Amino acid sequence: MKSNKCKMWFETARPKTLPLAIASIVTGSALAYYHQQFNGMIAFLALITATLLQIVSNFANDYGDHVKGSDTAERIGPLRGIQQGVISFAQLRVGLILVTLASMVSGVALIAVACQTWDDVIAFVVLGVLAIIASITYTVGKKPYGYMGLGDLSVFIFFGLLGVGGTFYLQAHYLDASIFLPAVMSGLLAVAVLNINNLRDVEQDKKSGKNTLIVRIGATYGRYYHVGLLALAALCALSFAFSYFQYWYSFLFIVILPLLIKHAIFVLRHKDALELRPMLAQMAKLALLFNIIFSLGLYLE
């Protein structure tokens, strides 16, 4: 029973989504290295903080969906611990509080090590608080923005612009125009992971009143949207590479493009939610792999 409960806590943390947090930190740190500003301790603390915030979001997602009755036995995705009765509502609330506190401690350590001016301290404290609020209010509260179709925008901002840009700034202490395309690339790939989740759960979300972007535009346009996300992410990577890379071996990320194309074709052709179930983990792995190989090109320059 104890091992089953540990397994349920592990599943509630949703390890398949954690590559989203890792990918933005990897890319932001690689950009810092490219600009000769890399700091290993800052990169490590940023990675821990981002991962904890992702777990906060995942715990809060289960918490909020349970309160609103969105996650039922009908859902296509794996049943969480609270749905199976292994983790109680009160226990999940305590878990959410503890992980939130852990993310705050990690965030304070990151700010203490990285920030050099009081302006930066204030700015990143505010951003940290906003990140925690955004992680929790995705499904928790009277008007959770995840139920209003704003999840895609939030993921793009936090796993793209802020994830990559913030990681770079904390190490370099300035911003550079060259980070924009990789930040957008990382954000679009992260949104694609969320989109697969929403495509899979579209019918259940409709029933529960969870008006995700896919519920609003429909599954058919949602699949076209998915292809568009991947195409734009690839275009951002290629645009950056042709603008900044000098050596052919820095273009290694191109080997991942066929895998993205294969994934996109599968999503276009398969409409059954059950068939899309394994695509969530696949898209998360592809997003992380693409960011890693792209970052490797930055290190090789």
Image (cartoon, rainbow, N blue to C red):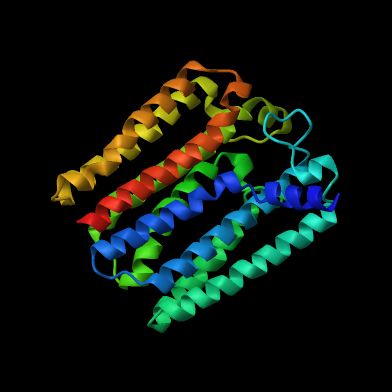
Q: Using the image, determine if residue 105 lies above or below residue 166.
A: below
For the point 49% across and 66% down, the residue is: 127
The quarter of the picture where residue 34 lies is bottom left
- Toward the viewer: 285 or 210? 285
- Toward the viewer: 118 or 233? 233
For the point 52% across and 26% down, the residue is: 217
Number of marks drawn: 0
Left/right placement of residue 299 relative to residue 128 reads left
Question: Can residue 213 be seen here?
Answer: no
Left/right placement of residue 180 relative to residue 76 reads left
Question: Can residue 111 be seen here?
Answer: yes
- Toward the viewer: 281 or 231? 281
For the point 46% across and 71% down, the residue is: 124
Horizontal and vertical percent position of residue 138:
62, 49
The quarter of the picture where residue 38 lies is bottom left
Q: Quadrant of the C terminus?
A: bottom left
Q: Using the image, determine if residue 225 lies above or below residue 186.
A: above
For the point 76% across and 28% down, the residue is: 74
Horizontal and vertical percent position of residue 131:
54, 61
Horizontal and vertical percent position of residue 214:
55, 30
The quarter of the picture where residue 224 lies is top left
Q: Using the image, determine if residue 26 lies above or below residue 220.
A: below
Left/right placement of residue 76 relative to residue 265 reads right
Horizontal and vertical percent position of residue 190:
46, 44
